[in-house]
Amino acid sequence: MVELLSGRSIAVVTGAGMSTDSGIPDYRGPNSPPRNPMTYQQFVGDRDFRRHYWARNHVGWRHMDAARPNDGHRALAQLERRGIVSGVITQNVDMLHTKAGSRRVVDLHGVYARVRCLNCERLVSRFTLAQRLDQQNPGFLASVAPAEGVEIAPDADAVIASTAHFRMVDCQYCSGVLKPDIVYFGESVPKPRVAEAFDLVDRSGALLVLGSSLTVMSGLRFVRRAAKAGIPIVVVNRGPTRGDEFAALTSHAGCSETLTALLDALPARTAGTPTPTA
């Protein structure tokens, strides 16, 4: 792996397996329970589904907000500072790359910390919304198990069975429907965000995939893009992925241990250093 990546500007794609060492579970890892995340159509089309989601998220977002970057996140940030990593395209919404100090991060699926009105498009912080929800639902958090005793999904959704008594709030500016600024299943990633990610891949000399099964096209398309351009691809994931057939190298290992080793092994790149040809 070191020989393949050395001297190259590396674009990185990360998935949920990147954050498991920070206490955030993944979707499709070998030991992950079956998950049935809410779709965009369910969220916008059914008020009961929305209420159920917001009740669960009101607990789950706090767990995600409290999560801290792990050794892998910190290693990636250092690799960027050394001129080795050109940027990160993450499928995660946990903001841990940004918290670790990575500067060029494409949050492909959005972030947990913002909420958008589907009518007027205003953005508010998740903390601000939490204060409004607390006012409407006094004692709700105390009525469910503490966050550390509740199963949390990778999209900040807590597994809570009884939510019928939870009261939602609407946009305080136009009374529109509020939705986390997260791309749901069945929803498209904004085109400018995809274009930024493609540009990052196109300008790099290698693509490193970390902790993603690449099951959904939103991540796999960058692997296909790199393969078509002849850019070498390395996949690190605990289990097979849909991108393995395109990879020059696959490693069934953890992200933190792999990145820590790469940080020690890869020499820094200076500005203007040419990327070797494949």
Image: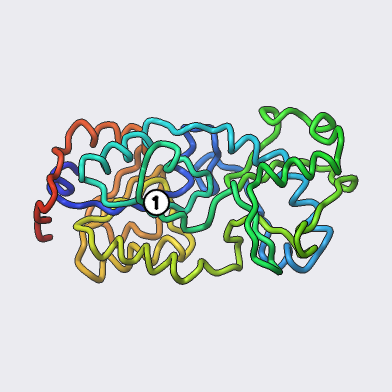
Q: Residue at x 77, y 65 (%)?
A: 174
Quadrant for the N terminus in the image: top left
Quadrant for the C terminus in the image: bottom left
243 over 159 or under it: above or below: below
User: How are the colours assigned in the image?
Assistant: rainbow
Q: Residue furthest right?
A: 165
Q: Residue 115, position in %: x, y?
A: 65, 54
76 over 43 or under it: above or below: above
Q: Observer-nearest residue: 223 or 48?
A: 48
Instruction: Give the left or right position of residue 209, taking residue 48 as reference.
Output: left
Q: Observer-nearest residue: 90 or 138?
A: 138
Q: Residue 205, position in %: x, y?
A: 19, 57
Q: Is residue 78 visible?
A: yes
**Label 1's element?**
strand
Determine which quarter of the picture holds residue 71: top left
Q: Amino acid at mark 1?
A: Val
Q: Is residue 254 visible?
A: no
Instruction: Give the left or right position of residue 118, taking residue 45 as reference.
Output: left
Q: Residue at x 86, y 32 (%)?
A: 139
Q: Residue 133, position in %: x, y?
A: 79, 44
Determine which quarter of the picture holds residue 253: top left
Instruction: Give the left or right position of residue 266, taking residue 182 as reference.
Output: left
Packing grade of label 1 (10 A; few <14, some 14-19, many >=20) is: many
Q: Which residue is mark 1?
A: 105
Q: Residue 218, position in %: x, y?
A: 46, 64
Determine which quarter of the picture holds residue 120: bottom right
